[in-house]
Amino acid sequence: MRSLFFSLLLFLSCASMLKAQELNARVLINREQVSNTKSGVFEALEKQITQFLNERSWTNLQFREQERIQCSFNITISTYSETDNSFKASLLVASTRPVWGSSYSTTVWNYNDKDFSFNFQEFDKLEWRPEQVDNNLTAMLVYWVYIIIGMDLDAMSPMGGTDYLRLALDICNNADGLGNDGWKAFGDTKNRFAIANDYLDGSMEKFRQLQYEYYRKGLDQMSENIEQARTNIAEAMNLLKESHEDKSLSMLPQIFTDIKRDELVSIFNSQAPKEQREAVCEILSRINPSQNQYWDKMKQ
């Protein structure tokens, strides 16, 4: 009887692991800018997006429950029309990863996508057919799913997220015909196409390598040898510099420094060697001078 019990427990445990999906997404719909509208459609939208993101497999990889990527999709509705069920909104999408050997989670991605318009009715069910991209809401969500997954895998192994970043770029190419903003090739240096295309551009390989060096050889080593980990991150900043020089029009280095601003200032504090701090500060100032008030703290 005891043997049967433990066999059943093992089966349920394995089944639970196999069912665990890639994302643990928190979805929030902010409708404060929309008045005199029943809440049902917004509640339905939040529920449908949450289920859509969390209850399906986006890769052929196995993620344990504790390995699911922590992320958030915060949608701020600016206008809503009950006449044609149309929404205009912005989407703040963010993801984090745990740092090994600590209780700290580091932000991998944080971006406000302002070109977000879609149609949705209260009883709609969200479906995804990659061979037929005909819905801007699901196309937006899946695009960011693959960006999040691709970047998370890049942070775990060199160029590990390539397959999923390619899927994100495929969505851009297939969604361009929808007529919504954000998908057009070369239309904007910070739109969805530009982000995915730059990640896959051969001239930005050093930026992709930076992800692994920064997270795995840097942050993940902090608990074991903080001096060596800091040195590895300082060396990774040279990859950031070179990627910026190789493709100066790409916004990825600037986006990275915006996301990592406070973290970098904390890493290269007064305990770091002065020469190291000054070298990192010079690189960051060239890439993102708008944050110089923060980079200058490294010199103090």
Image (spheres, rainbow, N blue to C red):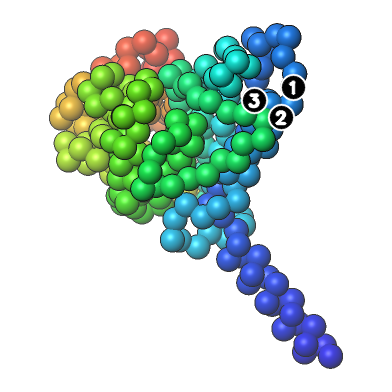
Name which quarter of the figure residue 233 lies in.
top left
Q: Which mark is residue 29?
A: 3
Query: Of 41 and 141, which appears nearest the observer?
Result: 41
Indicate which disc, 3 or 2, sits on the residue closer to the N terminus.
3
Identify residue type, mark 1. Ser
Q: Residue furthest right?
A: 1
Depth order, front residue of 109/42: 42
**Residue 37 horizontal/vertical position (percent):** 72, 14
**Label 3 Cα crowd, 10 Å radius (few <14 / some 14-19 / many 20+):** some
Residue 2 point in image, percent of width and height = 82, 88
What residue appears at the point 35 percent right and 23 percent down from the top-left corner? Answer: 179
Above-or-below relation of 255 to 212: above
Q: Is residue 34 above or below residue 17?
A: above
The residue lying at 58 percent from left, 34 percent from top is 72
Q: Using a 10 Å C-alpha cutoff, classify the residue at mark 2 as few (fewer than 14 neighbours), some (14 to 19) or many (20 or more).
A: few
- Numbered badge on residue 43: 2
Which residue is denoted by mark 1 in the rendering? Answer: 39
Residue 78 placement (x, y as % from top left): 57, 12
Comes first in the chain, label 3 or label 1: 3
Disc 3 is placed on an element classified as strand
Residues under labels 3 and 2: Cα distance? Answer: 8 Å
